[in-house]
Image (cartoon, rainbow, N blue to C red):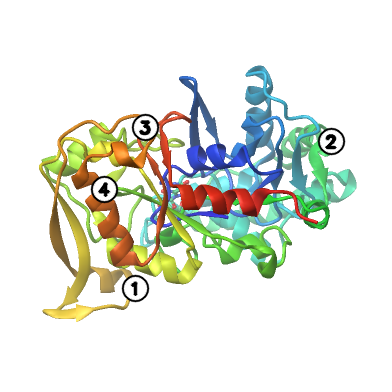
């Protein structure tokens, strides 16, 4: 399983793409089209939002699990773009009949609520993710199976639109949505989605029974997890490894390894705590060299330095077996690289991660300056080719987190990657057919 160890955007798309070569199935378990996975193959760029990156490998089946919130319109748009790019989606891509559906009123309510006076502004991706998960937990959501049941869909839309229009008008003075128009659009979408829909929990468990291997593709990151992240500045799903079991219907004891992804530095989009944020020129340099602009919204990402206390936390809540470090080459030109090695509050060492945003404000980061390497690492594929200072930087991260590094990404392309031998062997064992 692959999880983001920071606030998302760690480069999961590329790493899932590289690893999916060895796996039979790739499964998404949480989030929706708020995610943006960028994969570059032979210089051609693919941005995947809902569809797992496994779709880029013909031998791999891709599953959108029950823990995902699916926007039918966004899904069909992505499918059309993939077909156009000549990729095989039909018969290769499966959507859970238990996944929740995002409808236009989710977006309407989210947009209005984000801008309402007195509300905490989260800086969401405005995709309706939060309100769709609210309806799921409120047991008034529409699932993909219900979308295909046109009588039920009609009744659901009539009732829900009536209710949501009243709420949105009363609270935010929003313009009402038209139920008939919505039904016509979503009934048409249902017909096109139907061929992809099945009981994906059954599909995945049958695959395991047949000795096949599954790669779980996390979206967002640990610090955006609804429970373990920087609440309320989080997304509305379980982005951490625990979400993979509930979000797919595969039991936790069937999951062998958890691979945590971290950039060689740190970024976040949207509001909320970011202890190592650097708003100076150095932070801007990271944004420029790392091309740190949101894949989905185009927003400039906030940038800062590697935060080891947060990585240790990510190790704890996810049970990380390996780390993968991405974008090492972005640090190439620096003479010195600050790394946060600990937190202090009122001059005293603090090991706990705050439960409240206000707790983060009191934190003082303790930095250690690591020597830079000032040479290009772009495209290197062997660990031994890395300059000594870069190897020392990575060794320091391993020592401080207690997690070994399995891969280091040295550029955006599929081939710009260093794979450590022990890691390659373990992936090989985990993905080879059993039984
Ligand atoms: P939502 O997921 O659209 O509700 O947004 C909640 C927060 O999560 C905002 O700060 C978003 O910027 C952030 N977020 C959601 N998805 C991603 C992602 O894939 N990468 C980075 N940040 C994300």
What numbered label is drawn on residue 391? 4
Q: Position of residue 296 (x, y in %)?
A: 46, 36
Specify the quadrant of the image occupied by residue 25. top right
Which mark lies nearer to you, 3 or 1?
3
Q: Secondary structure at mark 2?
A: helix
Residue 381 horizontal side relative to residue 392, left or right: right
Residue 156 horizontal side relative to residue 422, left or right: right
Which mark lies nearer to you, 4 or 3?
4
Q: Position of residue 62 (x, y in %)?
A: 70, 41
Sooner in the amino-acid sequence: mark 4 or mark 2: 2
Q: Residue at x 24, y 61 (%)?
A: 275
Q: Nearer the viewer, residue 117 or 321?
A: 321
What numbered label is drawn on residue 195? 2
Sooner in the amino-acid sequence: mark 2 or mark 3: 2
The residue at which mark 1 appears reads as 356
What numbered label is drawn on residue 411? 3
Q: Are marks 1 and 2 in contact (CB under 8 Å)?
A: no
Q: Residue at x 80, y 46 (%)?
A: 147
One can see residue 220 in this view: no
Relative to 383, say whether 40 is above or below.
above
Q: Are marks 3 and 1 in contact (CB under 8 Å)?
A: no
């Amino acid at each position: 399983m692959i999880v983001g160890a920071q606030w998302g955007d760690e480069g999961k798309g590329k790493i899932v793409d590289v690893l999916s070569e060895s796996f039979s199935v790739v499964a998404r378990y949480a989030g929706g089209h708020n995610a943006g996975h960028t994969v570059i193959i032979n210089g051609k760029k693919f941005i995947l939002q809902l569809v797992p990156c496994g779709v880029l490998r013909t031998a791999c089946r891709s599953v959108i699990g029950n823990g995902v919130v699916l926007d039918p319109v966004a899904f069909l748009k992505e499918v059309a773009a993939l077909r156009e790019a000549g990729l095989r989606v039909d018969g290769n891509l499966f959507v859970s009949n238990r996944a929740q559906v995002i409808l236009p009123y989710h977006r309407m309510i989210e947009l209005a609520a984000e801008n309402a006076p007195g509300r905490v502004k989260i800086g969401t991706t405005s995709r309706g993710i939060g309100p769709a998960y609210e309806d799921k937990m409120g047991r008034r959501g529409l699932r993909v199976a219900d979308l295909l049941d046109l009588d039920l869909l009609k009744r659901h839309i009539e009732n829900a639109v009536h209710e949501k229009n009243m709420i949105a008008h009363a609270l935010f003075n929003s313009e009402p949505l038209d139920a008939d128009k919505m039904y016509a659009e979503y009934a048409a979408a249902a017909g096109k989605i139907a061929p992809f829909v099945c009981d994906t929990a059954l599909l995945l468990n049958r695959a395991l029974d047949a000795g096949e291997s599954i790669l779980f593709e996390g979206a967002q990151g640990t610090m955006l997890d609804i429970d373990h992240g920087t609440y309320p500045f989080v997304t509305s799903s379980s982005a951490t490894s625990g979400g993979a079991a509930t979000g797919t219907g595969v039991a936790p004891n069937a999951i062998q390894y958890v691979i945590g992804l971290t950039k060689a530095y740190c970024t976040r989009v949207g509001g909320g705590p970011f202890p190592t944020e650097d708003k100076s020129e150095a932070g801007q340099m990271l944004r420029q060299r790392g091309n740190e602009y949101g894949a989905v919204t185009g927003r400039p990402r906030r940038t800062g330095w590697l935060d080891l206390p947060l990585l240790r936390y990510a190790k704890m809540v996810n049970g990380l077996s390996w780390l993968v470090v991405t974008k090492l080459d972005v640090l190439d030109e620096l003479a010195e690289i600050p790394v946060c090695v600990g937190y202090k509050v009122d001059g005293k060492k603090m090991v706990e991660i705050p439960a409240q945003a206000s707790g983060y404000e009191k934190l003082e980061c303790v930095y250690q300056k690591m020597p830079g390497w000032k040479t290009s690492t772009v495209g290197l594929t062997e660990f031994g080719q890395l300059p000594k200072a870069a190897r020392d930087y990575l060794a320091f991260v391993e020592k401080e987190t207690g997690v070994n590094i399995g891969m280091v990404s040295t550029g955006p392309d599929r081939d710009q990657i260093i794979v450590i031998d022990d890691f390659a062997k373990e992936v090989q064992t985990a993905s080879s057919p059993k039984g």
